[in-house]
Image: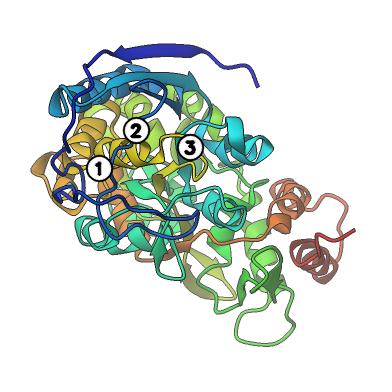
Amino acid sequence: MKKKALAVVLCMSLVPGLLCGCGNGGQATKENQNETSPGEPAAEVPDKREADNGKVTLKIWAEEANFEMLTQMIDSFKEAHKGEADFEIVLEESPDNATKDNVLGDIHNAADIFPFADDQLSALVAAGALEPVYDQEAVRTANLEEAVEAAAINDIIYAYPMTADNGYFLYYDKDYFTEEDVKTMDGILAVCEANGKQFTMEWDSGWYLYSFFGNTGLEFGINDDGVTNYCNWNTTEGAVKGVDIAQALLAISASPAFLSQPDSEFPAAIASGQVIAGVSGVWNAIEVKNAWGKDYGACKLPTYTCKGQQIQMSSFTGYKMMGVNAYSAHKEWALLLADWLTNEQNQTVRFEQRDQGPSNIKAAASDAVKQVPAIQAVIAQGEFGRLQRVGNNFWMPFVDFGTVMAAGNPDGKDLQELMDELVTGVTASTVQ
């Protein structure tokens, strides 16, 4: 993987002594060392052991767009712990969505600290790649309950919650829609059709298409092996059957106002004026605001018509967190720095500079956060969502299924057969 490195050298003289607490925990450092093994959380703030002739070298992976912001945070860490060590901290470019693969590909040469989305947690923990946070209770009480749940397995918190906005919801142009219009998919499509405009959503993606299945009473989840899925979305019994959902999807895609396209194309689509509503996330909030200005609206997902009734669309809720490599040569310092990068102050910085929604309870409660429609929409949608806990084979079956649904099932394939194929793919064993 090609990466761009930015060295942030923090030169500080090494002196004896221990630092005061920082970040989420705010606990005082103890004089004794905390010997822990990978997978075992430290009970106290870890001692910052010296190495490499007094120099502590740490590597942080991050997306390049966050480099400037993270440099400021590192500078504040340096100032808070002035005179305690000679640091060399390097920022290295790595996409958040590739963290798991990059860490597990070469764990001993991976970054000391790295951000990732909650769906990568299980694999990283299973591989023994994550050092649990050092003050479990302090992190638990400082952050939103579901953000902590997303960072934990078997009640052990393995990473520091960082954002609580990695989900999706509805954006709409208030110049066209009323609040009543956007309550239902039927209402959205009717307004779009009347104005010769379009509604967009990425349908060849299991992440987005899950929204039509989540609140139907049908079952889906990850098995105890942490790798495979169980799913009954092809059931032929019950109040809502798999074919009922497939038929509902075909009814939506039959509208001339419907457009399935990659989420990455959403900003250009709204800027062109052709798309006036769509499903996306906070990462596009700035582009939406630039395109629609005072008419920028955001809310929870609508209901959709299925078997003669209105069903609230669901979603995968998403959280990002900061992890520490269990094999870091300086994991005690890495834990303290990761804690600092995700504390209340720096989550506020993330919000102010990058429009990232805080997981920290106090930061999330600020008046400024409450004024951002996208963040309030993802919070409102959270009531109807679920944590993304899926096995390896969940994603690929939706590429074909979503493509067929978006195209209106052009070959006229039997809907039960389509549902059976989808479920067979989702529940397939990874063992070849």
Along the line of sight, the residue nearer the viewer: 297 or 98: 98
Q: Secondary structure at mark 2?
A: helix
Total marks shown come to 3
Snapshot quadrant of residue 104: top right
Residue type at mark 3 is Ser
Can residue 194 be seen here? no
Tell which circle, 1 or 3, labels the residue nearer the N-terminal end. 3
> Pointer 1: residues within 10 angstroms few (<14), some, or many (20+)?
some
Marks 2/1: CA–CA distance: 9 Å
Q: Position of residue 244 (x, y in %)?
A: 67, 72
Q: Give above or below for 71 relative to 21.
A: above
Q: Position of residue 95 (x, y in %)?
A: 53, 29
> Pointer 3: residues within 10 angstroms few (<14), some, or many (20+)?
many
Residue reaching furthest to the left: 367
Tell which circle, 2 or 1, labels the residue nearer the N-terminal end. 2
Q: Nearer the viewer, mark 1 or mark 3?
A: 3
Asked if disc 1 and disc 3 are in contact, CB closer than 8 Å, the reply is no
Q: Position of residue 91 (x, y in %)?
A: 42, 20
Q: Secondary structure at mark 3?
A: loop
> Pointer 2: residues within 10 angstroms few (<14), some, or many (20+)?
many
Left/right placement of residue 390 relative to residue 287 reads right
| Residue under label 1 | 373
| Residue under label 3 | 328
Q: Secondary structure at mark 1?
A: helix
| Residue under label 2 | 285
Label placed on residue 393: none
Asked if disc 2 and disc 1 are in contact, CB closer than 8 Å, the reply is yes
Residue type at mark 1 is Pro
Tell which circle, 2 or 3, labels the residue nearer the N-terminal end. 2
Along the line of sight, the residue nearer the viewer: 305 or 6: 6
Q: Give above or below for 37 relative to 106.
A: below
